Amino acid sequence: MRAGPAEVVPTEYYVALSALVFAIGAVGVLTRRSAIMIFLSVELMLNAANLALVAYARQWAAAGTLVGITGQTAVFIILAVAAAEVAVGLGILVAIFRRRVSTDVDTLAEVRL
Amino acid sequence: MITFAVLAVVMVVGALGVVLLRQPVHAALSLVGTLLTLAVVFVTLQAHFLAAIQVIVYGGAIMVLFLFVIMLLNLKEEATKTRAAYRWVAYGVGVIAAAAIAVGALLDPRQAPDALAVSEALRGGSPELIAEVLFGEFMLAFQLVGVLLLTGMVGAVALVQRHNEPPRPGTPLADASRRDARGTR
């Protein structure tokens, strides 16, 4: 556990934390009925994935490769994609709410392929 | 290690708040707490630039958008509902999945990464290093993200645009638009 002057937390702990937050978000997606609460839980899962990426980026950087900084750049791209996703998703929510008063996903049965 | 333990506890409590709190605004504020904690975790992982971006983009822009829409839609009474039938199944699946991955991760102990090697390779996740990769290896992804943001912007504007047909009477937004019309006349 001790490596060098500063104490370093192993990568596994970060990955375990990421898995925990991801699972909590998945439970939220499964249990909530309101579309906006499902959306909040999806954001939680997205951030858990980001945490795993940054944790592995540090692990790869310790191996002395440039892959580490590539992992952090991927998180940067994911942040931009998440911003676009939220803008469109909330736009769809507002449009749905304007047609019908609720955002309950169980009543949106006619939205199917 | 103590820092990590404190951050992990705060983050998990915040995540549980997102899933369990009844009021949408409370859940959104709980998510803000989780995202800011994640920014601090990024700092402990030598990703300082990402931590700043996390606070600005997620803690700032995205969460403001969420809170704005929650308050605009005023979904007080229906957002409190959860699917009772699936709830215990979902809790079981979540606990089993989290436990399996966490135990799997913790049962595979490797040597902790060397702090000196990490800070030498990442240089604290400085913007210069990220820019080098972003405008080199990730150039195509960068341009695609630009197209995606433009598409998202156009899509969001097109989705919330008011059409000529009036909204169904009785919905809150129809009442609001009637009030607007009266106010401008």
Image: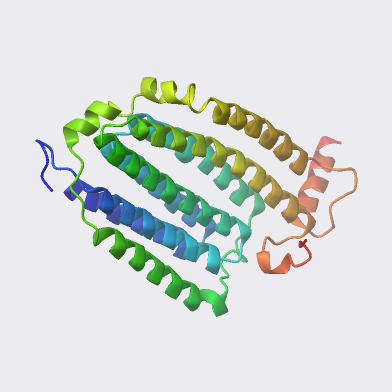
**Is B160 above or below relative to A27?**
above
Position of A78 with respect to B168 (left or right) is left
Position of A26 with respect to B76 (left or right) is left
**Coloring applied to the structure:** rainbow
Q: Residue at x 33, y 43 (%)?
A: A56
Position of B6 with respect to B17 (left or right) is left
How many marks can you see?
A: 0
**Is B48 above or below relative to A14?**
above
**Is A111 above or below relative to B125?**
below
Percent coordinates x, y for residue A59 in the rendering: 28, 41
Q: Nearer the viewer, residue A113 or B171?
A: A113
Q: Residue at x 35, y 62 (%)?
A: B101
Q: Residue at x 43, y 68 (%)?
A: B94
Q: Nearer the viewer, residue B108 or B142?
A: B108
Percent coordinates x, y for residue B164 in the rendering: 90, 43
Q: Identify the residue at the far bottom of this view.
A: B85
Q: Is there any visible trace of residue B72 in the rendered image?
A: yes
Percent coordinates x, y for residue B49 in the rendering: 37, 29
Q: Nearer the viewer, residue A55 or B72?
A: A55
Q: Is there any visible trace of residue B32 in the rendered image?
A: no
Q: Residue at x 80, y 46 (%)?
A: B177
Percent coordinates x, y for residue A69 in the rendering: 36, 31
Q: Quadrant of the C terminus of chain B?
A: top right
**Is A91 above or below relative to B131?**
below
